[in-house]
Amino acid sequence: MTATSNKVVLVTGANSGIGKETAAALAKEGAHVVLAIRNRAKGEAAADEIESRTGVRPELLTLDLASFGSIREAAATFLAHHDKLHVLVNNAGLVLDSRTTTVEGFETTFGVNHLGHFLFTRLLLGALKKAAKEDREARIVNVSSDAHRWARRGLDWDDLQSEKKYASFDVYAKSKLANIYFTRALARRLEATGVTVNALHPGVVATEFASSDDVGFFTSFGFKLVRPFLKTSAQGAATSIFLASSPEVRGVNGKYFADAKLKHPMRLAQDDALAERLWTISEAMVASVETSAAA
């Protein structure tokens, strides 16, 4: 029996790629899986496929990580139906060829890949802690990437929103570094709660992630050329599934994994002072929106 058998599991970005494969594998293991998806039609198609493969139909939850309103509504909807959450897999992510902004005005890659999951996770912490208290443990799995190593100089604290300079994969790399900082800062806050959080690199995966809709024709074309040499979605989901369900990582907290093995992120990513700095700034960003809404 795995750690997810008969447990509630929520996967963001679960309508395709490694998110869908993660959800399907955990459903097959006996979990009650909730697919958090932005596009309802694609979500229904993913649910149909997962049901046909596993015999279990997952639950759908509409979630747009580029909108705080949608994030809060999704969390409220989930909590209205579930008082406990055993596993949260923060899988959704994107890379964009040009700079755009979220509903609240944050740069979209940072807003979706980091800030959206930051808010969503915090809204669900109560359900995660209750699951840990009553059922011995709960887990948060953050899908980061070894792309964080491209951000050699770290986050640009004077330009987190990439207003001065925007380079697609540089911005993406920094968002993946932010995922690791978030993991480390959250892990310290979860000590002794029974809830653990870990980050992972899925590998370079042949999914729809770098579609022409996101990154533009030439970048997308480049991905298509190398696609035959990349991991399949199922292979890319292996470490997410491992961290969500394996007894081997019970109690492991604040770490980084690749190929289902412990791995060290780059040295700069291990700086807990910088992780705390990002946490404080992220809290302030969320609070600034709440203050503006109340004004």
Image: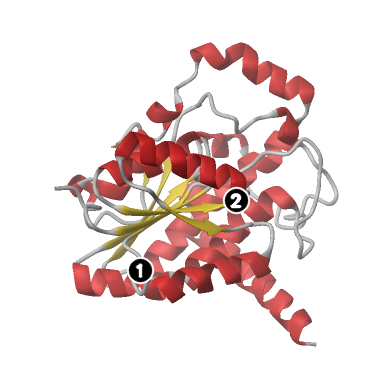
Q: Earlier in the sequence, mark 1 or mark 2?
A: 2
Residue 258 placement (x, y as % from top left): 38, 35
Quarter of the image with the C terminus is: bottom right
Q: Is residue 254 visible?
A: yes
**Seen in the image, is 80 located left or right of residue 251?**
right
Residue 11 placement (x, y as % from top left): 44, 51
The amino acid type, in three-letter code, at marker 1 is: Leu
Q: Residue at x 51, y 71 (%)?
A: 77
**Mark 2 lies on residue:** 40
* SS of the residue under disc 1: helix
Other-residue count near label 2 (Cα within 10 Å), few / some / many at <14 / 14–19 / ≥20? some
Which one is in front in this view, the residue at disc 1 or the one at disc 2? 2
Q: Nearer the viewer, residue 72 or 251?
A: 72
Residue 157 placement (x, y as % from top left): 70, 57
The amino acid type, in three-letter code, at marker 2 is: Arg
Outermost residue on the bottom side: it is: 295
